[in-house]
C-alpha cells in the first residue's frame, strides 16, 4: 500500500483535462529568456540557485582552509605572511558562517518546505527572490574585496578594539561589517517567507501535529533568526559608525566599552550555532524515517526538543567570554545553561537510535551520512560540555581545542546531514539518481579525512597551541600533529572533488529517478521528479503524519483553484482548514533590480555616510515599482475576487 | 469591475464542478483575500515587527549597559530638551485614533473613508518627521561627543527611519488608492499598514522614556 | 581511531613540557587538570556507550529497501521498550551532566581559594606585540620593570593586575593557570602559584593582530633566594660601560633612534613605547620569544626586525657595521 | 563591448586605489648602506633648484602608513608642541597655513632639519620610513589625504574630529615662525 500510494497523486491530474494541466503549467512557469531567468519567483529555481551559490562559497571557504593548513603544515613555514594569513582565516570563518552554513540551510528549506507542506509556491515569492539576490551580492562583494586586498583581517567575530577605528586602518573591517548587513537582510527576509509558508500555506489536513520534522526544524530556525540576527546587525552598525562617523560605542576613554561588542555579537553568535545545527537535525529525521522504513520514534519529544534547544540557545552567549572579567556568579549560570542544552539534543539522538533499533534499515549513502553524524556530533557535543565549564574553559578557550570542537559540531551537525540530505533529495530536484558507488567513496573519504584533520587539534590545543597563529616555533613539538591534520584536510579535499564529480556525471548520465525512489512518506515525494512548476497538479489533502504511507480517508485532493492564475490555497494556522484562494504575484524583475539598488547603497555607505541618503532614492523607486500592481494582473484578480 | 469579470468569465466556466465521488474538496467559493491572521501579509508584517522590535530592545539594553560604565549620566552634557520630544509623543499617540478609523474603513471596504484617513495619516507622519528634526537639535549632545551621545542618536535615528519608511509606505498607498488599479486585496494592505503604524507608535513610548526620562531619573 | 589517539594525549604531553596544559606545575593548573581528567573519563564512557548502543541498534534493526512496506502501525503503538530505554538514557545523561556541573563548580571554588598571604603583586601590561611587567614592592621605590619575562619564586602566590595598552590580549601560561584577557579600559586579576622550579612558556591567546603568533614570554620559577637575588639585580640601573666599544655603543643608543622608544635606566634614553632594555642581556629571548638572546640574533634583529616579526612596531635601524657592533657589545653588558 | 571596457577600467581604478590604500608595507631595511635621513642639508640653495629627494611610493595614500604616523606623532611627543595639530608653542597643523611648504619633501625636511625657534632636528633619531609615515599623517591632519585612507578617531578622549572627517584645507604659503621660546 505504501508503495502504491504515491502513484495516486501523479499527473495526469485527477480532475483537470490535459489542456487545463498544460495551462496550469504555463501559468506557473517563468517567462523565457534571460529576463525571465532574472525574474523568476518559483521557489524551486530560487532555492536551486541559492544552494549552488552557497556550495560555491563552501568551496571557496574550503580553498582558504587548505591554504591555512598548508601554512601550518610545518613550524615557522613562510608560505603565507601574517597579513595574508589573517585575511584568509577571517575570510574562511566569515564565508562558512555567513555565506554557506546559514543560507544553505535556508535554501534547502525554501526548496522543500513548500513541497513538504503541499503548497504550490512559497509565501512572498518575490521576497524570497530578493533574499537570494542580496546574498549573492554580499558574497560577491566580500570576495571582490578580498581580491582587491580589502579582505577583512580581524577574525570572523571581529573583536573591538582590534576591528575598531584605531587598530584597523583602511576599509577591511568596514568591508566585513557591511558583508554582515547583506547576509543578515537575506537571512531575515527568507525567515519571514518560511514562517508564513509553514503557518498559512499547508495543504488541507496538515495540522500542526502532522508537520514533517524538517519543516518544524526550519520553522524553529526561522524564529531563531528573527531574534538573533538583529543583535549582530546592531553591533556591526555600531562598529561602522565608530569607524566612519566617530561614535564612541566601543571607546572606553569616552564612555564606551569593548565588551559591549562581545555581548551583542555572542547574543547572536551562539544562537547562530543552533541556527546552523537545527535544520541539520530536521534533515536527519527526514532521512532516518524512510531508511528505517518506519516513522521517527517520539515525534512530540522531537518537536519539543527542537523548541527547547531554540530557547536555551539564547541563554549561553557568555560562555564565549569566560576568559574576560564578567562576574563569576553569572559565569556559573551560563555553565549550567550550556550543559542543560545538551539534554534536548541527547533526547533526539536517543529517539533516532530507538528508531533505527526498531526499523528495517536500508543502508544507502544518505543513511551513511546519518551514521557519520552520530560519531562526529556526539564527540563534538561532549567537548562542548567540557567547554561549558568555566575553569576548564580558561585552559582550552581560544586554542586549537576550540577549533576542533567547533568543526566537530558544525561539520558533524550541519555538513554531514546536509550531504546526506543532498544524496536523499537530489533525485527529487533533478530527476536523476546520484551514483551510489561514488557516494560511498565520497562519504568514507570525508569521514576519515575529517577525523584525521580535526581530532589532533584537540591535543594541540591542550598542548598550548592558540588558535589564529600564522606559525609556531619548532621546539614546541606541534609539528607532527599539524602535519597529520594537513593530510586529513587533503583527504577531505579529494572527497569533495569526488562529490562534484558525482554530481556532474549523474546530472548527465545518472539513472532516471522515479517520483519516490526511497519509498518515503512525505509530500515532496507525491509529485513528479523534478516537480512541475506548480509543484502539485492536484493540491493534496493530508490524512496523517506520513501521508504517502497512510491510508486516506475522505477527500484526497483540492479542486476549484484557477488554472490561468497563480492561485495558492491558504489554510488556517492550527488545523489547516481551507481559508482562502490567494492569487500570487506574477514573475517580476523588480526584486533583482531592488537588490542592485540596495547593494549600491550599502557599498556606497562604506565610503561616505551620505550614500545612505542618496542611495535610498533608487531603492525607494525600485521597491515602489515592485509593489505597484499591474493592470492585467489586477483584472485577473478582480475576475477571481471573492470578498471575505 | 464587471466588464473585467466578464472578460475572464468563459475561462472560469471551463472548470467543471468537482467530481461527486467525494475524493475532491472544492475550494472555488473561498474568499480571495482576508484581514488579520487570515491575511498572509499580516504575518509578514508581524515578522518585520518582531525583527525591528528586537533591534529596539537591544538598543535600549545597550543604552543601560553603557550607562553602567560611567559615573554620571549624561556624561558632561545637558539633559535633552523635552519640549519637541513630548510634542511628538502627543502627536504620535493621537495618530492612533485616525489609524484605527482607517483600519475600520478598510475592513468595511469603504473606499472614500479609506482614502480620507490614509491621507490624514500621511499628513500626521510628515508632521512627526518635521518635529523629529527639531528633536535632534534639542538633544544637547552630538553623536561623536561621547558614548551617551552615540546611543541617544542611534535610538532616535532608528525610530526616525521607521517614521520615514512608514510615511513613504503610506504615501505610495494613498496615491494608489486614488489612481488605482484597485482590488479587494488593497483594503487588507491598508489594514496592515495601520498595524505597522501602531507598532511605530508603540515603539516610540519606551524610546521616548529612555531618551528623555531615563537620564533624569538614573 | 578516536580511541587510538586519545592515549596519545599523555605521551605527547611529554614532548613540550614548557607550554602544556596537561603538565601542570602550579596548583591552579593542577586543579584544572584534575577536572579535565574527570571530564575526559566521563565523556569517553558516554561516547563509547552511545556508539555501542548505535552499533547494537544497527545489528538488531532488520534489513529492508525502498520497497519494504513502512510500519505505519507504529503510530498507534506506544512502543514501551523503546520508551523505557530512551527515558532511562536521558535520565542517565542528566545525572552525569549534574555530576560534571558539580565538579566544574567545585573546581571554580578551589581556584578562588588560593591562599594569598605575602603574595607577589605584579602589573602586567600587554602591547602589540610584547609584554611589560612591573614588580610592585614596598616602598614603591623598590618597584622595577621588565619585559617579556616573568621570574617568580616557587611556592609563593602571585597576584597579577592585567592591563592592555591597545587591543584585547590574553595572558596564558598553561602549565601554571588558565588564561585571562587583558582588556583596554579595564583591569582584570589573575592569581596563580608555581610549585615546581623550571622554565615555562606563556603566549598571547586572544587574536591581537599580525604578530599574535609571536607574542610569547618566558616564566622562570626559581627558589625564593635566587628570586630575591634576581630581583635585587633588576633594581639596579645599567652599569657604566667599561670598554671603549661599549661606550661607543651607548653613545649610538642615546644619539640614535633607539632612545626614541626604548628606556635604559641610568642613561638619557627614556623612550616609553618599547620594552625596557635596562637588563636586556639577562633575558633568555629577544622580541617576545621570537629569537634566542645571542649577539648574532640581536644584530640581525636590529638590522631587519620585520624579517622576523612582520608588522611589529620596531623599525629597521640602519647603522654602520662598526656602530652596530658597538651597540650590540654595549647591550650585551646590560646583565 | 564598450560597457565591458568601462567595467574593466572601473575595476582597474578600484584595484589601484584599493592597493594604495590597503597594503601594509612593513618597513624594509634601506637598500645598501646607511641612509638615515639623507636629504638636502638646507632648504636654501644657490642657482637652479637642486634635485629633491624622491618621495617613496605607497605612503601618501596608504591607510597603514598614516595610522603608523599617527601613532608615532604621539610616541615622539609631537603633541608636546603641536597639541593634536591644534598648535601650542608650535604652529597648528590642522589649518591651511604652511610656513615651510606642504609638499611631502618640505615636511620631511622640516622634521629632519628642524626649524628656527623651537622645531628640533630629528636627523639621525628617526628612520626615513617612519618620517615618511609621519609626513603622510601630518598631511592628513589638514585633509590633504584621501578620506577613505586617513585615520579615524582614536580610542581616547575625543579632542577633535578625526583626520578622515577633516575637510581639505587648501594649502597656502604663509604664517610666521612662533616667537623664540624663552629659554
Image (spheres, grey):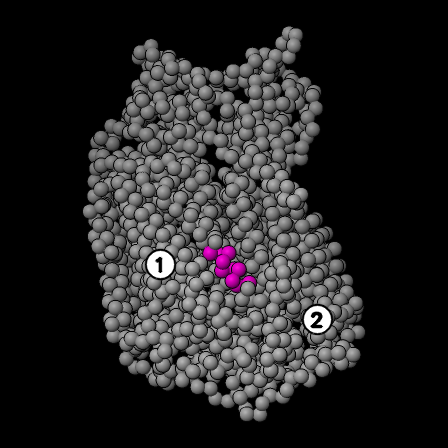
Q: In the visual, does C81 lie left or right of A621?
A: left
Nearer to us: label 1 or label 2: 1
Of the numbered discs in the image, which one, if any, rests on residue A406? none
The picture places residue A499, in percent across and down from the top left corner, at 40, 58
Q: What is the crowding at mark 1: few (fewer than 14 residues within 10 Å), some, or many (at least 20)?
A: many
Q: Is residue B201 visible?
A: no
The picture places residue D108, in percent across and down from the top left corner, at 57, 21
* Quadrant in the picture for the N terminus of chain B: bottom right
Q: Secondary structure at mark 1?
A: helix
The picture places residue C101, in percent across and down from the top left corner, at 31, 61
Q: Residue at x 58, y 35 (%)?
A: D16
Image position of A523 with respect to B124: above or below = below
Q: In the visual, does C35 lie left or right of A50?
A: left
Q: Quadrant of residue C61?
A: bottom left
Q: CA distance from mark 1 to mark 2?
A: 49 Å
- Mark 1 = which residue? A442
Q: In the visual, does A541 lie left or right of A300?
A: right
Of the numbered discs in the image, which one, if any, rests on residue A633? 2
Instruction: Using the image as rendered, state which of residue D1 and residue C54 is in the foreground.
Output: D1
Instruction: Using the image as rendered, state which of residue B81 and residue D173 is in the foreground.
Output: D173
Q: Is residue A52 magenta?
A: yes
Q: Which residues are magenta?
A: A46-55
Q: What is the crowding at mark 2: few (fewer than 14 residues within 10 Å), some, or many (at least 20)?
A: some
Amino acid at each position: 500500500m505504501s508503495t502504491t500510494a504515491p502513484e495516486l497523486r501523479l499527473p495526469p491530474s485527477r480532475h483537470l483535462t490535459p489542456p487545463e494541466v498544460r495551462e496550469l503549467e504555463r501559468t506557473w512557469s517563468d517567462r523565457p529568456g534571460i529576463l525571465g531567468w532574472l525574474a523568476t519567483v518559483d521557489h524551486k529555481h530560487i532555492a536551486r540557485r541559492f544552494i549552488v551559490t552557497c556550495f560555491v562559497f563552501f568551496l571557496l571557504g574550503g580553498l582558504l582552509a587548505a591554504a591555512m593548513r598548508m601554512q601550518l603544515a610545518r613550524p615557522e613555514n613562510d608560505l603565507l605572511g601574517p597579513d595574508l594569513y589573517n585575511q584568509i582565516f577571517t575570510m574562511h570563518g566569515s564565508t562558512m558562517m555567513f555565506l554557506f552554513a546559514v543560507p544553505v540551510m535556508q535554501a534547502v528549506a525554501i526548496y522543500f518546505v513548500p513541497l513538504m507542506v503541499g503548497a504550490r509556491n512559497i509565501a512572498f515569492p518575490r521576497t524570497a527572490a530578493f533574499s537570494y539576490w542580496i546574498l549573492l551580492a554580499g558574497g560577491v562583494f566580500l570576495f571582490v574585496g578580498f581580491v582587491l586586498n580589502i579582505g577583512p583581517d580581524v577574525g570572523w567575530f571581529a573583536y573591538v578594539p582590534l576591528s575598531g577605528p584605531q587598530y584597523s586602518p583602511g576599509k577591511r573591517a568596514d568591508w566585513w561589517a557591511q558583508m554582515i548587513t547583506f547576509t543578515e537582510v537575506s537571512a531575515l527576509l527568507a525567515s519571514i517567507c518560511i514562517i508564513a509558508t509553514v503557518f498559512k500555506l499547508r495543504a488541507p489536513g496538515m495540522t500542526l501535529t502532522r508537520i514533517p520534522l524538517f519543516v518544524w526544524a526550519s520553522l524553529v530556525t526561522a524564529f531563531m533568526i528573527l531574534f538573533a540576527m538583529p543583535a549582530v546587525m546592531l553591533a556591526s552598525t555600531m562598529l561602522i559608525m565608530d569607524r566612519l562617523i566617530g561614535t564612541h560605542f566601543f571607546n572606553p576613554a569616552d564612555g564606551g566599552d569593548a565588551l559591549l561588542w562581545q555581548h551583542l555579537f555572542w547574543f547572536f553568535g551562539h544562537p547562530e550555532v543552533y541556527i546552523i545545527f537545527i535544520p541539520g537535525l530536521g534533515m536527519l529525521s527526514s532521512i532516518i524515517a524512510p531508511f528505517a522504513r518506519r516513522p521517527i520514534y517520539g515525534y512530540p519529544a522531537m518537536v519539543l526538543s527542537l523548541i527547547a534547544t531554540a530557547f536555551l540557545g539564547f541563554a549561553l552567549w557568555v560562555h564565549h567570554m569566560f576568559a574576560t572579567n564578567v562576574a563569576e556568579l553569572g559565569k556559573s549560570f551560563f555553565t549550567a545553561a550550556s550543559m542543560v542544552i545538551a539534554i534536548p539534543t541527547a533526547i533526539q539522538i536517543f529517539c533516532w537510535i530507538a528508531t533505527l533499533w526498531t526499523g528495517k534499515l536500508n543502508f544507502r549513502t544518505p543513511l551513511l551520512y546519518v551514521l557519520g553524524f552520530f560519531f562526529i556530533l556526539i564527540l563534538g557535543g561532549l567537548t562542548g560540555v567540557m567547554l561549558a565549564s568555566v575553569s576548564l574553559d580558561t585552559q582550552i578557550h581560544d586554542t586549537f581545542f576550540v577549533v576542533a570542537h567547533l568543526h566537530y559540531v558544525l561539520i558533524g551537525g550541519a555538513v554531514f546531514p546536509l550531504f546526506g540530505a543532498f544524496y536523499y533529495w537530489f533525485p527529487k530536484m533533478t530527476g536523476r539518481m546520484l551514483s551510489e558507488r561514488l557516494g560511498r567513496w565520497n562519504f568514507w573519504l570525508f569521514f576519515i579525512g575529517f577525523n584525521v584533520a580535526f581530532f589532533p587539534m584537540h591535543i594541540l590545543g591542550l598542548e598550548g597551541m592558540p588558535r589564529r597563529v600564522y606559525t609556531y616555533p619548532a621546539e614546541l613539538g606541534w609539528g607532527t600533529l599539524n602535519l597529520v591534520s594537513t593530510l586529513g584536510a587533503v583527504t577531505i579535499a579529494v572527497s569533495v572533488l569526488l562529490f562534484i564529480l558525482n554530481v556532474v556525471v549523474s546530472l548527465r548520465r545518472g539513472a532516471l529517478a522515479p517520483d519516490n525512489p526511497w519509498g518515503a512518506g512525505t509530500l515532496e515525494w507525491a509529485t513528479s521528479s523534478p516537480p512541475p512548476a506548480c509543484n502539485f497538479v492536484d493540491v493534496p489533502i493530508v490524512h496523517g503524519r506520513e501521508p504517502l504511507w497512510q491510508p486516506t480517508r475522505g477527500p484526497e485532493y483540492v479542486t476549484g483553484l484557477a488554472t490561468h492564475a497563480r492561485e495558492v490555497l491558504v489554510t488556517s494556522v492550527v488545523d489547516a482548514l481551507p481559508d482562502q484562494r490567494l492569487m500570487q504575484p506574477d514573475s517580476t524583475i523588480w526584486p533583482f533590480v531592488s537588490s542592485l539598488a540596495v547593494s549600491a547603497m550599502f557599498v556606497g555607505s562604506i565610503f561616505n555616510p551620505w550614500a545612505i541618503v542618496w542611495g535610498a532614492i533608487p531603492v525607494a523607486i525600485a521597491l515602489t515599482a515592485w509593489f505597484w500592481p499591474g493592470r492585467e494582473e489586477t483584472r485577473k484578480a478582480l475576475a477571481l475576487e471573492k470578498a471575505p | 469591475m464587471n466588464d473585467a469579470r466578464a472578460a475572464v468569465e468563459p475561462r472560469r466556466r471551463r472548470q467543471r464542478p468537482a467530481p461527486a465521488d467525494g475524493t475532491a474538496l472544492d475550494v472555488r467559493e473561498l474568499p480571495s483575500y482576508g484581514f488579520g491572521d487570515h491575511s498572509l501579509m499580516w504575518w509578514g508584517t508581524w515578522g518585520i515587527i518582531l525583527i525591528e522590535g528586537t533591534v529596539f530592545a537591544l538598543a535600549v539594553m545597550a543604552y543601560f549597559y553603557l550607562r553602567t560604565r560611567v559615573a554620571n549620566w549624561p556624561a558632561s552634557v545637558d539633559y535633552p530638551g523635552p519640549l519637541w520630544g513630548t510634542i511628538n509623543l502627543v502627536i504620535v499617540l493621537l495618530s492612533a485614533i485616525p489609524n484605527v478609523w482607517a483600519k475600520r474603513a478598510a475592513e468595511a471596504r469603504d473606499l472614500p473613508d479609506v482614502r480620507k484617513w490614509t491621507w490624514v495619516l500621511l499628513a500626521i507622519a510628515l508632521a512627526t518627521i518635521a518635529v523629529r528634526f527639531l528633536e535632534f537639535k534639542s538633544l544637547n549632545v552630538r553623536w561623536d561627543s561621547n558614548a551617551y551621545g552615540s546611543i541617544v542618536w542611534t535610538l532616535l535615528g532608528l525610530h526616525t527611519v521607521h517614521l520615514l519608511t512608514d510615511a513613504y509606505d503610506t504615501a505610495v498607498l494613498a496615491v494608489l488608492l486614488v489612481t488605482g488599479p484597485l482590488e479587494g486585496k488593497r483594503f487588507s494592505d491598508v489594514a496592515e499598514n495601520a498595524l505597522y503604524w501602531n507598532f511605530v507608535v508603540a515603539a516610540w513610548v519606551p524610546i521616548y522614556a529612555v531618551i528623555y526620562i531615563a537620564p533624569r531619573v538614573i | 581511531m578516536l580511541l587510538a589517539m586519545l592515549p596519545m594525549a599523555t605521551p605527547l604531553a611529554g614532548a613540550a613540557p614548557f607550554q602544556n596544559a596537561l603538565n601542570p606545575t602550579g596548583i591552579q593548573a593542577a586543579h584544572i587538570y584534575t577536572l579535565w581528567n574527570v571530564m575526559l573519563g566521563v565523556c569517553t564512557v558516554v561516547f563509547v556507550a552511545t556508539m555501542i548502543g548505535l552499533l547494537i541498534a544497527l545489528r538488531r534493526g532488520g534489513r529492508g529497501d525502498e520497497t519494504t512496506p513502512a510500519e505505519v502501525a507504529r503510530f498507534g503503538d506506544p512502543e514501551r521498550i523503546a520508551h523505557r530505554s530512551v527515558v532511562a538514557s536521558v535520565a542517565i545523561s542528566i545525572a552525569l551532566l549534574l555530576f560534571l556541573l558539580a565538579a566544574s563548580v567545585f573546581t571554580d571554588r578551589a581556584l578562588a581559594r588560593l591562599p594569598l598571604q605575602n603574595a607577589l603583586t605584579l602589573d602586567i601590561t600587554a602591547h602589540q606585540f610584547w609584554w611589560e611587567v612591573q614588580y610592585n614592592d614596598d616602598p614603591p621605590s623598590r618597584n622595577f620593570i621588565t619585559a617579556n619575562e616573568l621570574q617568580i619564586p616557587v611556592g609563593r602566590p602571585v597576584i597579577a593586575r592585567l592591563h592592555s595598552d591597545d587591543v584585547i590580549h590574553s595572558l596564558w601560561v598553561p602549565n601554571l593557570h588558565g588564561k585571562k584577557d587583558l582588556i583596554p579600559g579595564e583591569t582584570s586579576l589573575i592569581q596563580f602559584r608555581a610549585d615546581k622550579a623550571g622554565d615555562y612558556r606563556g603566549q598571547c591567546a586572544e587574536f591581537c593582530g599580525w604578530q599574535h603568533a609571536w607574542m610569547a614570554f618566558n616564566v622562570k620559577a626559581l627558589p625564593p633566594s635566587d628570586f630575591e637575588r634576581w630581583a635585587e639585580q633588576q633594581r639596579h640601573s645599567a652599569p657604566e660601560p667599561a670598554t671603549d666599544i661599549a661606550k661607543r655603543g651607548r653613545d649610538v643608543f642615546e644619539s640614535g633612534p633607539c632612545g626614541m622608544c626604548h628606556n635604559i635606566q641610568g642613561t638619557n634614553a627614556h623612550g616609553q613605547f618599547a620594552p625596557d632594555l635596562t637588563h636586556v642581556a639577562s633575558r633568555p629571548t629577544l622580541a617576545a620569544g621570537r629569537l634566542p638572546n645571542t649577539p648574532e640574533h640581536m644584530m640581525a634583529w636590529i638590522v631587519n626586525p620585520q624579517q622576523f616579526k612582520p608588522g611589529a612596531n620596531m623599525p629597521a635601524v640602519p647603522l654602520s657595521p662598526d656602530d652596530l657592533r658597538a651597540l650590540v657589545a654595549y647591550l650585551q653588558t646590560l646583565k | 563591448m564598450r560597457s565591458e571596457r568601462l567595467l574593466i577600467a572601473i575595476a582597474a581604478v578600484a584595484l589601484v586605489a584599493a592597493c594604495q590604500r590597503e597594503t601594509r608595507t612593513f618597513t624594509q631595511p634601506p637598500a645598501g648602506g646607511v641612509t638615515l635621513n639623507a636629504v638636502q642639508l638646507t632648504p636654501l640653495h644657490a642657482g637652479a633648484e637642486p634635485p629633491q629627494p624622491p618621495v617613496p611610493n605607497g605612503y601618501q595614500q596608504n591607510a597603514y602608513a598614516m595610522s603608523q604616523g599617527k601613532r608615532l606623532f604621539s610616541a615622539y611627543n609631537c603633541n608636546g608642541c603641536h597639541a593634536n595639530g591644534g598648535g601650542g608653542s608650535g604652529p597648528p597643523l590642522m589649518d591651511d597655513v604652511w610656513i615651510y611648504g606642504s609638499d611631502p619633501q618640505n615636511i620631511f625636511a622640516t622634521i629632519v632639519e628642524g626649524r628656527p625657534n623651537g622645531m628640533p632636528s630629528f636627523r639621525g633619531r628617526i628612520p626615513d620610513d617612519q618620517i615618511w609615515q609621519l609626513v603622510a599623517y601630518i598631511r592628513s591632519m589638514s585633509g590633504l589625504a584621501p578620506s577613505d585612507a586617513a585615520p579615524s578617531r582614536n580610542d581616547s578622549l575625543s579632542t577633535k574630529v578625526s583626520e578622515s572627517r577633516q575637510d581639505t584645507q587648501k594649502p597656502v604659503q604663509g604664517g610666521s615662525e612662533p616667537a623664540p621660546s624663552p629659554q
